[in-house]
Image (cartoon, rainbow, N blue to C red):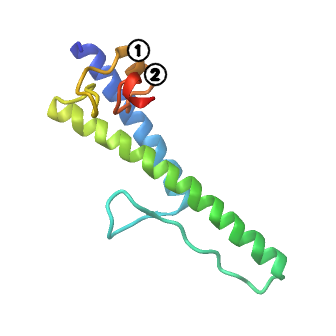
Amino acid sequence: MDKKLKEKLREKLREAKEKLERRLDSLGKRSKKVKGDWITPYPKFDGGGIEEEADEVEEYGNILSVGYTLELELKKINDSLEKIKKGQYGICEKCKKPISQARLRAYPQAAFCKKCQE
């Protein structure tokens, strides 16, 4: 892969990382104990009715699910940025062959080539 494309993809990954971190920050706060983990505060009930409290618990569950998905995507991005540093970026983790440039342009954090992803 040429240097110019790799730099362009690195920048795309950095931008995606910043965007995901901002989104995660809006859902909770960063864990001081576990790197790459966000803590979503449990709702504080203010004495409302049981339906209202049930709605808050349901919303909390939805936020946890979204947060988990975003954390996984952030991990993929961080892994890709680390691979760039180590000179291992763009290589399929399964078959060890190059991932197509078209795939990396579409999804820069891809860890597998199209064949191995299927």
The amino acid type found where label 1 is placed reads Ala
Marker count (numbered): 2
Where residue 117 appears, x then y in whole percent? 41, 30
Q: In this view, does 23 lie above or below 102?
A: below
The CA distance from mark 1 to mark 2 is 6 Å
The residue sitting at 33% across, 65% down in the picture is: 34
Q: In what element is the residue under mark 1?
A: helix
Amino acid marked by disc 2: Ala
Q: Do the residues labelled 1 and 2 touch (CB within 8 Å)?
A: yes
Residue where numbered disc 1 is placed = 102
Residue at image mark 2: 106
Task: Using the image as rendered, state which of residue 36 and residue 65 is in the foreground.
Answer: 65
Give left or right: position of 44 versus 19.
right
Q: Counting other residues with Cα less than 10 Å from the Cα at mark 1, is it few (<14), some (14-19), or many (20 or more)?
A: few
> Which element is circle 2 on?
helix
Q: In this view, does 43 lie above or below 40?
A: below
Q: Nearer the viewer, residue 13 or 103?
A: 103
Q: Residue at x 40, y 61 (%)?
A: 37
**Residue drawn where x is 64% and y is 66% of the image:** 60
Of the 4 image quadrants, the one containing the N terminus is: top left
